[in-house]
Image (cartoon, grey):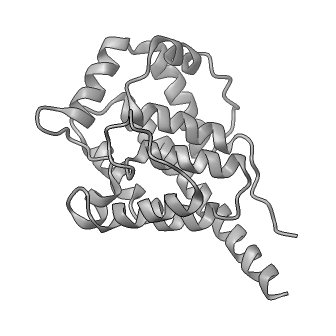
Amino acid sequence: MHNQVQQSPRSDIYLLLATLFRQAPNAQLMQWLAQLNTEEESSAMSADWRALCQLAKETSLESVAEEYQDLFIGIGRGEVMPFASWHRNGALMEKPLIELRQDLASLGFERNDSVKEPEDHMAALCEVMAMLVEDNSPQQGVFFNRHIASWYKDLVKQIQDAKAAEFYRVVANLLAQFMELEEVALSEQSIAVRSSELD
């Protein structure tokens, strides 16, 4: 039997990150973040949750929307490029996107026609991971390693270095801490899967 990576609340965190990277948070999400019950732990991730909770209490919807616009949209383009192809190949719509589309097709995922961004947007990748986690798919580790692990740290650094970043600097810190935990957990899962296949 395969060692299972703990499911909850991984899918919820993936979906939260997807929502925050897809668009600026609305009033309902900001209120939810402001009321988070964060555990008093000394871990970096717990500190990031508390910081995000505090910022949600202090930051206006208008300023977060403006920050999102400056970071991810801008005039022509924003300060931050949340696409795998950009970070891995230096341009949009490159080989990583082609490979991703092939993997999504093999996993049975279809593109939503209402979504304008390429599928290698961090929000879309987090949505796929959330569904793989929900299904307890053995492909979690494969997908993560092929399409997220190699570039998420570059995205985090780009956000941390961005002039406009304040609320999203904390989101980036949370992304970094969560993805680091995922790397460890999913590598252990992959080893367990390979071991069981040899038995």
Q: Compare residues 155 and 23 and report the one nearer the observer.
A: 23
What's the residue at 25%, 66% (across, down)? 89
190 versus 199 height, above or below: above
What's the residue at 38%, 53% (across, down)? 120
- Whether residue 137 sits left or right of residue 124 in the image: it is right
Q: Quadrant of residue 72?
A: top left
173 versus 195 height, above or below: above
What's the residue at 40%, 57% (across, down)? 153
179 versus 72 height, above or below: below
Q: Compare residues 136 and 116 and report the one nearer the observer.
A: 116
Tell me the quarter of the image containing the C terminus: bottom right
- Whether residue 169 sits left or right of residue 103 in the image: it is left
Tell me the quarter of the image containing the N terminus: bottom right
Q: Compare residues 6 and 39 and report the one nearer the observer.
A: 6
Q: Position of residue 17 (x, y in %)?
A: 50, 38
Q: Compare residues 188 and 138 and report the one nearer the observer.
A: 138
Q: Position of residue 21 (x, y in %)?
A: 41, 36
Q: Position of residue 6 (x, y in %)?
A: 76, 52
Q: Position of residue 108 (x, y in %)?
A: 58, 55
What's the residue at 37%, 47% (across, down)? 121
Q: Quadrant of residue 77?
A: top left
Residue lying furthest bottom: 198
- Whether residue 195 sits left or right of residue 162 in the image: it is right
Residue lying furthest right: 1
